[in-house]
Structure formats: structure tokens, C-alpha cells
């Protein structure tokens, strides 16, 4: 945890310094602040890796048998994994937010104010928080699917690889599905469309592409997350050790 946290802060600092010194090449300081200096992107990778290994490792190294011998129910074991991942995600988002605020004060205090207008009439800080909420819900939609896949693969490396590759593949597919959704409107309810929630929270005009309102996107994300977690619960309870 300490190593991952330190790595995350170092990466954010590097991008902050590059943005400060070379804004022409590294983007608008406001935009980088809203994205927590790429912190959100790295959180996704860290959580997918942790989520993939947290279950697969139990089966790969046989530690699941020791837990079952101690009369823990499988449901208790899986729920404890969910709670652990939830705490991880809250911790990393809080860490990135605090560090992005420190980088703003140290590197960009003279460049912009938190109350400056950024997108769709929102202030910089409001846009950042909307992005955080959207990213949190989207990440948990992805993690619920990763948890399901982790129950299928016995190898930790395979689970992590499939999780990370799958995330990027899903992100690409979700963006190219817009033409299909405009042709067959019922496709707007597919789980990949829900991955655009973060963008829609920041920019309301995105609903013209997703064909869903923001409340519908939020509810859809929560429903699909619950469905994937329920399936992973069933798979975990029936999986042989």
C-alpha cells in the first residue's frame, strides 16, 4: 500500500511539474487539475490489479482452504473482499484529491482559481468533484466485472492481465458504440454506455450521444454493478477449491 501510494504521488507530481513548465505540450493546468494530474487513470490500473489478485491469489496459493477450515462462510469471505476494495478505492481517491490540491497551491496558485469557470458553467472545483463521482461509479462498474473474472481464473497474473486489457478494450468499444445506439436505440441500456457517466456529469451535452439522462446513467451503473457482483457471488460460492 505504501509503495503504491508513493508511486501514485510521484507520478502526479511529475505530471504537475511538466504541466507547469511545458503547458503547450502537457495541456491546460485547469484540465490537469480536474483530472487530478492523471491520478484517476492510475487509480483505475491500481484497483484493477488489486481487485484481480485479491481473489485469484486465494485460489492460486490455496489460502482459501485455510479460511474455509476456520469455518468462514464463502459469502463472508467474498463480502470482506468487497469491503476491502471499497476502502482501497476511497483511500486512493481521497489521497489523489488531497495531493492535487497541494500541487495546485504549490505549482498553480498564480495560474487559476478553484472558482474559475471551466466546463458547462461549472467551476473548476465543481468539475473536479463531478469527475470524481462519475469516475468512482464507473470504476466500480469495471471492478464488479473484474471481480467476476477473478473468480473464473486461477492464475493471479491471468486475472490481472485480463482485467487491465479488458478495461482498455471496453473503453474503446464504449466510444465506438454511439452510431449503433443511434440506429438501435435499445442498445443505449448496455453496460458499456454507462462507462460514459463521468463525461456526462462534467458535460451535459454528452447525453445527446449516450441517449440517456444523467440520473438514468447513475441508476444504470449501480444496477449493472449489483448484477455483476451478484453473479460473482454465485460463482464464488460454487467454485471448487
Image (cartoon, rainbow, N blue to C red):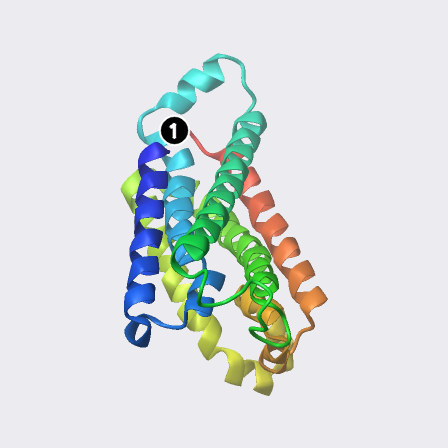
Q: Where residue 227 appears, x then y in whole percent?
A: 61, 51
User: Furthest-top residue in view?
Assistant: 70
For mark 1, give the secondary structure. Answer: helix
Seen in the image, is 76 located left or right of residue 6? right
Residue 54 seen by the camera: yes
- Residue toward you, 34 or 160: 34
- Residue toward you, 80 or 135: 135
Q: Where residue 36 appears, x then y in whole percent?
A: 45, 57
Quadrant into which the N terminus falls: top left
Q: Residue at x 28, y 43 (%)?
A: 157
Q: Where residue 22 appears, x then y in whole percent?
A: 28, 70
217 is higher (above) or lower (below) than 50: below
Using the rendered view, name the quadrant where residue 185 is placed.
Answer: bottom right
Q: Residues within 10 Å of mark 1 (few under 14, many from 20)?
A: some
Q: Which residue is mark 1?
A: 58
Q: Residue at x 62, y 82 (%)?
A: 208
Q: Residue at x 69, y 59 (%)?
A: 219
Using the rendered view, name the quadrant where residue 75 is placed.
Answer: top right
Amino acid at each position: 500500500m505504501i509503495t503504491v501510494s508513493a508511486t501514485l504521488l510521484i507520478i502526479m507530481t511529475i505530471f504537475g511539474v511538466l504541466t507547469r513548465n511545458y503547458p503547450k505540450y502537457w495541456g491546460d493546468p485547469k484540465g490537469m487539475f480536474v483530472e487530478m494530474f492523471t491520478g484517476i487513470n492510475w487509480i483505475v490500473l491500481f484497483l484493477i490489479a488489486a481487485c484481480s489478485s485479491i481473489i485469484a491469489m486465494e485460489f492460486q496459493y490455496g489460502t482459501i482452504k485455510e479460511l474455509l477450515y476456520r469455518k468462514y462462510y464463502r459469502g463472508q469471505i467474498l463480502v470482506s473482499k468487497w469491503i476491502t476494495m471499497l476502502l482501497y478505492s476511497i483511500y486512493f481517491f481521497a489521497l489523489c484529491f488531497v495531493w492535487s490540491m497541494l500541487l495546485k497551491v504549490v505549482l498553480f496558485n498564480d495560474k487559476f482559481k478553484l472558482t474559475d469557470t471551466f466546463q458547462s458553467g461549472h467551476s473548476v472545483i465543481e468539475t473536479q468533484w463531478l469527475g470524481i463521482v462519475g469516475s468512482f461509479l464507473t470504476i466500480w462498474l469495471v471492478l464488479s466485472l473484474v471481480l467476476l473474472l477473478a473468480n473464473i481464473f486461477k492464475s493471479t497474473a491471468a486475472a490481472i492481465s485480463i482485467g487491465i486489457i479488458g478495461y482498455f478494450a471496453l473503453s474503446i468499444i464504449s466510444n465506438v458504440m454511439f452510431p449503433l445506439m443511434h440506429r438501435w436505440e435499445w442498445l443505449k441500456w448496455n453496460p458499456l454506455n454507462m462507462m460514459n457517466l463521468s463525461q456526462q456529469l462534467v458535460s451535459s451535452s454528452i447525453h445527446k450521444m449516450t441517449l440517456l439522462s444523467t440520473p438514468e446513467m447513475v441508476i444504470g451503473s449501480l444496477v449493472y454493478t449489483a448484477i455483476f457482483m451478484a453473479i460473482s457471488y454465485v460463482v464464488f460460492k460454487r467454485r471448487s477449491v
